């Protein structure tokens, strides 16, 4: 039921939400926050006016989507866009309940003096709970040719579904994942540990790895940061706030996990048994990085395989988990994906549910693997794991011909440096696919070794995570800048 707020009440709220119309700047609260590195990729999409497309910012709760919108608004003002030509509207605001996007736009035009011929930027935050938002947004894009529309929402499953169904040719989706390790280091101002380059691609010369750090204790310090990232580093507020860390379980479970499992997904997909969905997610989180099967989960939970499959699809669409599929020793996909691995999209969700872990914890290997896979979330890479009767390789990349082009073994120890028997499966896989080089992560050993015609590149997990997170962003930025 729509509450009949007066026009004056609605316009007062819109003015309140857009303080830059008077001050010329966004609120200090947002201005003092560092931009996420993904802002470098997002802002050019907002600036793009030659294509009539709305930008749809998707991602899990608490990754900084609203903050990114405000940083975008400030950047537009800094680039000469008149403040009155920028309007921000949070659709979840109770006073806007029942008001269509077009009505809200008309309110803005009346207040600002702009009209449908004006060049304006309209930001709709938390749009997903507006009924049929995707149909109305598409209509706005088609009707207001000089307006740029940018929308965001936390129920990413709905946004992904709806934008794909109804926004073909009208929406550009942008996924904002949890923090990469590189962003965590950057946002906390800890990148002084490195003496290497501050811009561009980041690599470490393994022939003289000591040159990468500002002092001899640099790698040990980076490993401490890495463990902290695994426990607390996925979400900006937890990373930067001691208060949020002290109540990690409540903060993460209430604000990030429960609202998705108990409200977003049930409301959007008509899920009746939220306890069943919550139990499945808890099981997955506890076993992040482990191999699973629909049959095995069904037998453990008593839930049908079809229901489990549906829940997994929802959890993945909501950016809580990532499914990694299996290939065999020959590099071929299985016709029936009976077995697969599931990773949390960020390991800190495990900490929120089960408590922080130390470097020597028995489950740390799985969390390190989870962290490494999470760095690849924004890369256009086909990642798999290989498993056969007598062996397994943790990470395999397939090229456009679906042929293995790269393989890696994820270790959270230095044992594999001297005990080459631990590399038997990796060696066999590389030999089979004529791969002359391979990557192995370690705890803190860096260097090269050649063993039976295979060159192994050893690199600490912390450095590898940092480099992947950083280089994925720079690769994307570079591709946007290349005509």
Image (cartoon, grey):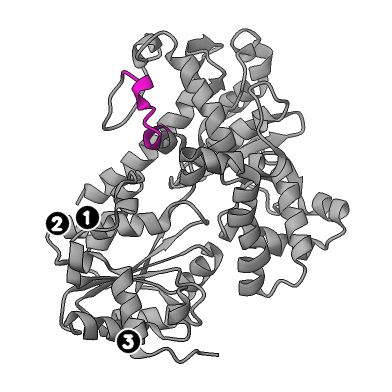
Residue 445 in the image: above or below residue 267: above
Residue at image mark 1: 75
SS for tag 2?
loop
* Residue 64, position as x, y percentages in the image: 43, 52
- Nearer the camera: disc 2 or disc 3: 3
SS for tag 1?
helix
* Residue 57, position as x, y percentages in the image: 40, 61
Q: Is residue 339 visible?
A: no
Residue 301 in the image: above or below residue 141: above
The CA span between labels 2 and 1 is 6 Å
Tell me which segment is drawn in magenta.
185-195
Residue at image mark 3: 8
Q: Is residue 410 visible?
A: yes
Residue at image mark 2: 79
Q: Is residue 275 left or right of residue 8?
A: right
- Nearer the camera: disc 3 or disc 1: 3
């Amino acid at each position: 039921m729509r509450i009949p707020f007066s026009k004056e009440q609605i316009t007062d709220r819109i003015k309140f939400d857009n303080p830059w119309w008077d001050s010329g700047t966004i609120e200090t609260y947002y201005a003092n926050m560092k931009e996420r590195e993904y802002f470098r990729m997002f802002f050019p999409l907002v600036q793009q006016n030659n294509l009539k497309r709305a930008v749809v910012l998707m991602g899990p709760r608490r990754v900084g989507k609203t903050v990114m919108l405000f940083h975008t608004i400030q950047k537009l003002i800094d680039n000469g866009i008149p403040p009155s030509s920028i309007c921000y509207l949070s659709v979840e605001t109770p006073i806007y309940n029942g008001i269509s996007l077009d009505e809200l736009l008309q309110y803005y035009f009346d207040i600002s003096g702009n009209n449908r011929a004006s060049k304006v930027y309209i930001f709709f935050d938390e749009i997903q709970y507006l009924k049929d938002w995707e149909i109305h947004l598409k209509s706005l894009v088609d009707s207001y040719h000089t307006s740029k529309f940018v929308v965001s929402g936390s129920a990413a499953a709905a946004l992904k579904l709806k934008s794909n169904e109804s926004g073909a040719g009208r929406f550009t989706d942008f996924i904002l994942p949890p923090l990469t390790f590189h962003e965590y280091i950057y946002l906390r101002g800890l990148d002084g540990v490195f003496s290497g380059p501050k811009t561009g691609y980041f690599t470490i010369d393994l022939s003289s790895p000591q040159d990468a750090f500002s002092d001899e204790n640099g790698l040990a310090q980076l490993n401490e940061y890495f463990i902290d990232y695994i426990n607390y580093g996925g979400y900006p507020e937890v990373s930067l706030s001691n208060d949020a860390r002290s109540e990690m379980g409540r903060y993460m479970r209430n604000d990030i996990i429960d609202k998705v499992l108990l409200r977003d997904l049930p409301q959007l997909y008509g899920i009746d048994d939220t306890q069943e969905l919550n139990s499945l997610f808890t099981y997955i989180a506890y076993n992040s990085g482990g191999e699973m099967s629909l049959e095995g989960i069904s037998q453990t939970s008593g839930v049908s395989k079809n229901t489990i499959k549906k829940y997994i699809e929802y959890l993945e669409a909501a950016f809580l988990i990532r499914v990694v599929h299996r290939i065999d020793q020959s590099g071929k996909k299985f016709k029936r994906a009976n077995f697969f691995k599931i990773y949390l999209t960020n390991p800190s969700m495990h900490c929120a549910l089960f408590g922080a872990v130390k470097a020597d914890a028995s489950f740390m290997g799985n969390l390190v693997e989870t962290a490494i896979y999470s760095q690849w979330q924004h890369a256009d890479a086909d990642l798999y794991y290989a498993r056969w009767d007598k062996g397994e390789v943790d990470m395999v990349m397939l090229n456009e011909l679906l042929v293995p082009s790269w393989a890696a073994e994820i270790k959270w120890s230095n044992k594999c440096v001297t005990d080459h028997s631990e590399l038997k499966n990796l060696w066999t896989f590389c030999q089979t696919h004529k791969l002359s080089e391979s990557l192995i992560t370690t705890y803190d050993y860096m260097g090269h070794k050649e063993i039976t015609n295979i060159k192994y590149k050893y690199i600490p997990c912390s450095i590898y995570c940092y480099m992947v997170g950083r280089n994925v962003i720079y690769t994307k930025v570079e591709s946007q800048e290349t005509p």
